[in-house]
Image: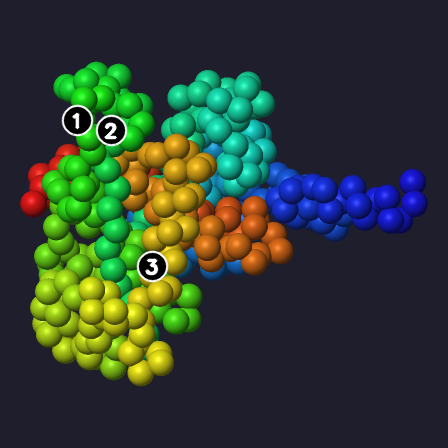
Amino acid sequence: MDYQTILLSIKMLSKNEQARLISELLGHSPTSYLSIRRQQFYDKQASCPWCEGKHYYKFGKDKGCQRFKCKSCLRTFTEYTGTWLDGLHKKSHVVEYLELMLEGKSLDKISSKLGINKKTAFDWRHKILSSLGQDKGNEMRGIVESDETFFEESEKGNRSLNRPGRKRGFSTSPDKKRKRGVSSSKATVIATVDRQGGMNLSVATMGRIGKDDIACSIATPLPEKTILCTDGHVSYKGFALDNKLEHVTLRADLKQHVKHGVYHIQNVNSIHNRLKKWIDNTFWGVSTKYLQNYLGWFRLNERLKDSASSLNDFISQTMQDTDTLKRYNYINIAHQWLLTTHK
């Protein structure tokens, strides 16, 4: 086999398969990805998950995982405590699972390929995605665009509905067409982006938004010199006044799409478009209960789309959070709270 044939074969591989090939040629085994967290503890770059202390020492092994003991709080932990790998069985399948997940494979295909239960594949997906949480927006600066978009409330996967099942294209029953405009049957997602690539996506409420929903979405106050660009929704005006921000309003109904050649909300509208296409085309819609998890996944995909080793970077990003399991166990409560915000 000559060089050109080999090169053509490599180009036919997926991006993740190419990255894996490169790592194996460099002498890194796929399982070495899972040792990233352990190496961080060895290099004293990670903190105790209980007290965030930096003073700890090796304390034996626990089912193959390196165990540590903190000198400050005297509690023990492993390299995976609090992360999505904590207590996960069949860790030998994790790297291949992540590869298939990043390639957009369905849960049926993943469970068949790895020989695991479909529910296990589903639980793994949302444990992983729970590590992404919600971006606090603390890196936003300069010109910041914000706007809301809507997703029909969905109970996809729920086998005990209190209403007739929906057909695609209908909101409540085959005889009743989907409601147009804003309604309490739609989950409102607020997207906030700046010109440096910072992005915050949040399931804010059900129905119409208020300035408090915007504040909770962005979470970290924007710097005072920030210029906020939005549509004509009055809640953004109130939010800008409360936070002493310069506010530029663009009225699409008055054909105001760009002001002074630089102020617009085209970036955030592009995010809305790509997000909806990704969710509809890849998953055929997602449950409102898990929508925030998919927003985090989309945000990380956007950040890593030019990465030369997306698998390695994805694992590095998702293994930093030690509140992952708490957030995963809180999904049901968070969903019930969201449903009480109907407006």
Q: Amino acid at mark 1?
A: Lys
Q: Residue at x 53, y 24 (%)?
A: 109
Amino acid residing under circle 2: Phe
Does residue 27 appear in the picture of this structure? no
As drawn, the label of residue 176 is: 1
Q: Residue furthest right?
A: 2
* Residue position marked by numbered label 2 in the rendering: 170
Query: Disc 3 vs disc 2: which is toward the camera?
Result: 2
Vertical placement of residue 69 versus 286, above or below: below
Q: Residues within 10 Å of mark 2 (few under 14, many from 20)?
A: some
Identify the residue shown where x is 24% and y is 55%: 148
Residue wearing tag 3:
269
- Reply above or below: 208 against 333: below
Residue lying at 52% horizontally and 32% vertically, measured from the top left: 105
Tell which of 269 and 12 is nearer to you: 269
Point out residue 238 in the picture as x, y percentages from the top left corner.
9, 68
Quarter of the figure that contains the N terminus: top right
Q: Earlier in the sequence, mark 3 or mark 1?
A: 1
Q: Are marks 1 and 2 in contact (CB under 8 Å)?
A: yes
Verify CB contact (< 8 Å) between mark 3 and mark 1: no
Identify which amino acid the numbered label 3 is placed on: Asn
Q: In terms of secondary structure, where does tag 3 sit? A: helix
Q: Quadrant of residue 144?
A: bottom left
> What x and y, as percent, mark residue 7?
81, 48
Distance from Cα at disc 3 to Cα at disc 2: 25 Å
Instruction: Name the N-terminal-most of marks 1 and 2.
Output: 2
**Is 68 drawn above or below residue 108 in the view shown?**
below
How crowded pointer 1 is (Cα within 10 Å; few <14, some 14-19, many 20+) is rated as: few
